[in-house]
Amino acid sequence: MAHTKSKGTSKLGRDSQSKRLGVKIFGGEKIKPGQIIVRQKGTKFFAGDNVKKGSDYTLYAAKAGVVKFIKIKRPTFTGRLKDRKFVSVVSAK
């Protein structure tokens, strides 16, 4: 037999740590090679010119320059056109 009365259970206390996802360097800002531009789960943003994609879908700069975000219509596997957001690094002049 229990020595204390039952106090019930809490449905709270299971909150996970935030993953700090999102855009780290915005359009028009200068960037160095290797700096992270976007941290994401899946491909919300796609890699454009002078940008590489990491194994966890992180986009980072391959060359120094200025970050540029553009929207391009690209066909899906069904042939339907869909807006895709691309991130590029253009040389700073």
Image: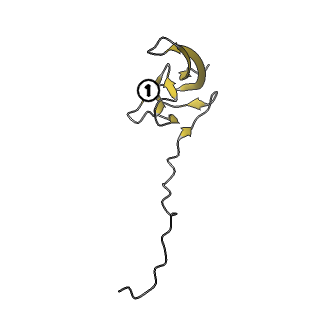
Identify the residue at horizontal 55%, vertical 25% (top origin): 65
Identify the residue at horizontal 49%, vertical 47% (top origin): 19
Identify the residue at horizontal 60%, vertical 24% (top origin): 69
The residue at the far left in this view is 1
Residue with the mark numbered 1:
52
Q: Position of residue 42 (x, y in %)?
A: 46, 33
Q: Nearer the viewer, residue 85 or 33?
A: 85
Q: Nearer the viewer, residue 8 or 76?
A: 8
Q: Amino acid at mark 1?
A: Lys
Q: Position of residue 29 (x, y in %)?
A: 62, 30
Give the crowd class for mark 1: few <14, some 14-19, many >=20 residues within 10 Å.
many
Quarter of the picture containing the N terminus is: bottom left
Q: Nearer the viewer, residue 26 or 91?
A: 26
Q: Quadrant of residue 54?
A: top left
Q: Is residue 5 left or right of residue 26?
A: left
Q: Secondary structure at mark 1?
A: strand
Total marks shown come to: 1
Q: Is residue 28 left or right of residue 88?
A: right
Q: Is residue 42 left or right of residue 65?
A: left
Q: Position of residue 23 (x, y in %)?
A: 57, 36
Q: Nearer the viewer, residue 89 or 53?
A: 53
Identify the residue at horizontal 61%, vertical 32% (top origin): 26
Q: Position of residue 68 (x, y in %)?
A: 60, 23
